[in-house]
Amino acid sequence: MGSISNLLVAEVLNIGLFLNILVSVSVRRWVLVTIIAVASIAFVISCVTMALFMTSKTASDDKLDDHDQRLHALEGRYAEVTTAEPTTIVKIKPVDAFQISTHYFPSYPDGLATHAIDGNLEPDYFKGSCTHTGSESEQNPWLAVYLGKSYHVFMVVVTNRGDESWGDRSKNLRVGVTNVKPEVGQNLDINSYTLCGEKPGLMGKIGIVRCSEGVAGRYVIVQFRTTNYMNICEIEIYGYEE
Ligand SMILES: [Ca+2]
């Protein structure tokens, strides 16, 4: 009996040990599974958060970079631009240009008004990308750029003729906007359009004029308050659609 009792006791102890081990393993497994699950969820949340952060940062950085680069380019090319402006401002592609009169030369490039909007900043007249009015006796010569539709004009940059000293003809720059088409041959009244600004004296290599907020129209007028030939090698216009 004693041996049977001992066997039963031993068996009970073995079963208890087995159950204890089983429970212990089970508990450890659940703990392990729980830890892995929590860690996985935390990892996924971290990845999603990081991805959202990176996406936001990249988009923001791209916008800032683009904005800063454009401003930097404007500041480098157009020194008077110092303040940030809405990103909607674009360089307007003009449709046409015409002027008070045009000089046609037998052996030089003609002084077509469209040379002011051909996208070429070349300041040497003889390279064929500048304008030339027809008479040095014309008072307040002008050139009009047709934008095709009405734009809010933000800034106008006029590139002067640069060969020899012919750029000295360009003085007392006036830039304005209007919806009334000037006629070729017309002596344009300097007060017949909405003035954006002036640059008194010699224009120098470039003339930069900013328009007030809200100034809009289909035509940009560039005029010199002087009596002389008018030579312009490029007119760049920045703004946004009305
Ligand atoms: Ca040009």
Image: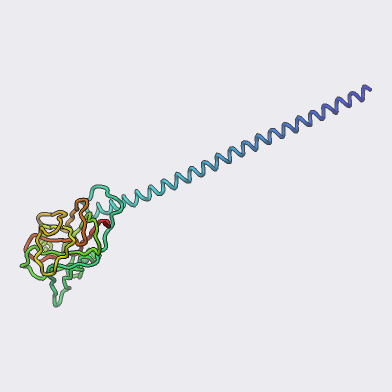
Frontmost residue, 195 versus 38: 195
In this view, the residue farthest toward the bottom is: 106
> In the image, is residue 188 above or below residue 35?
below
> In the image, is residue 122 above or below residue 29?
below
Q: Residue at x 15, y 54 (%)?
A: 197
Q: Tell me residue 128's x, y (percent).
A: 20, 70
Ligand 1: quadrant of the figure:
bottom left
Q: Tell me residue 20's x, y (percent).
A: 76, 29
Frontmost residue, 60 versus 2: 60
Q: Residue at x 34, y 52 (%)?
A: 66
Frontmost residue, 106 versus 12: 12
Give the quadrant of residue 36: top right
Query: If the image is split into quadrants, where does the C terminus sit?
Result: bottom left
Query: If the image is split into quadrants, where does the N terminus sit?
Result: top right
Q: Tell me residue 51's x, y (percent).
A: 48, 46
Q: Tell me residue 37's x, y (percent).
A: 61, 39
